[in-house]
Amino acid sequence: MRHITLTEPGTVLPESELILNPDGSVYHLALQPDQIGDTVFVVGDPGRVALISKRFARIEHQSQNREFIAHTGTLRGRRITALATGIGTDNLDIVISELDALVNIDLKTRSPKREQKALNIIRMGTCGALQEDIPVDTFIVSHSGLGLDNVLHYYAHENEDSEHRLLHAILGHVEWPDNLPIPYIAFGDEQLVRRLGEDNRVGITATSGGFYGPQGRQLRAVPSVDGINDAFTSFRSEVDGLEGLCITNYEMETSALYGLSGILGHKAATICSVVANRLRKEYSKNHHAAIERMINEVLERIVM
């Protein structure tokens, strides 16, 4: 996914659009430009930030505003940030937009910079597997995010040809229901996905706008559409260069992470530990241990 157009450098952004706190920090994250690293690990669970930062050689900044907790420090001589985003693509819309503002907008003049910086943004999360052969407590790396939410429909963008063909193939296979929003798709950064995907499962991640009905779960309220999960599970790509790619898992953030990163020029990847297999009706007995293993693996592969 890429942008069609971006706000021109030199454009002054009104106070109502780029909202800053009295100390000059961005509104929701409450961070200033010198308080983040070039690599940002994003997590949904606020408690996971400390699990990452305890591995830093040194922590130089800690802050919290609402659900957004940030720890910035150094590891192996590199400056990195662990950031809690909260749950959902609406929160990722805030997080990616404000991270981009921190590095690509001059907050004093309120204008986009002429020289743009690309962040590495890696999500470490949890998910539910949609393929029977994926055990709980294993890791899935998202080749792409299939957006069942609607966030990216509000941004001017265009798909790469391979993204367009893959989305068309998925919609045709599923026979997408008329009463649901049309999905979008965005690919992750090829190099990051390849690095994290070695010896792990790589597939298409379905990003939903909720945890229960939007993922086909039924408690008391009954989902409006039957059979989508079965169609997701049975999909196999025949798109040139993407043969055999399948929809491996459900989660709630990757489509917005990949889409907005693509539009704004950042490099993004998602890796998730499988806490549930939806087909086997299994749930992890010790997903905390799996998350610890995932953090160790990601730091080893990314912070070389």
Image (cartoon, rainbow, N blue to C red):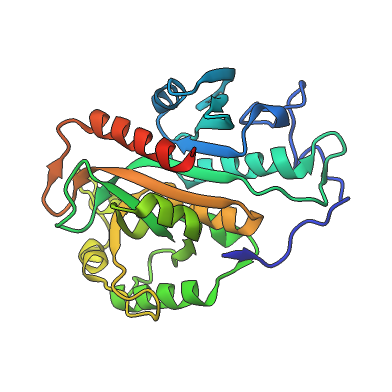
Q: Residue at x 20, y 65 (%)?
A: 230
Depth check, front residue: 291 or 27: 291
Q: Is residue 282 visible?
A: yes
**Residue 140 appears at what percent x and percent y?**
31, 51
- Compared to residue 199, the image places residue 233 above or below, namely below
Q: Residue at x 39, y 49 (%)?
A: 196
Q: Which quadrant of the rendered structure holds the N terminus?
A: bottom right
Q: Is residue 188 visible?
A: no
Depth check, front residue: 124 or 78: 78
**Residue 65 appears at what percent x and percent y?**
58, 23
In the displayed structure, does residue 196 sit left or right of residue 230?
A: right
Question: Residue 235, located in which quarter of the rendered image?
Answer: bottom left
How many numbered discs, if any? 0
**Residue 181 appears at what percent x and percent y?**
44, 64
Q: Residue at x 80, y 37 (%)?
A: 15
In the displayed structure, does residue 106 sit left or right of residue 240?
A: right
In the displayed structure, does residue 204 sit left or right of residue 11?
A: left
Depth check, front residue: 291 or 284: 291
- Compared to residue 225, the image places residue 91 above or below, namely above
**Residue 73 appears at what percent x and percent y?**
57, 24
Depth check, front residue: 28 or 225: 28
Q: Residue at x 88, y 50 (%)?
A: 10
Question: Residue 216, located in which quarter of the rendered image?
Answer: bottom left
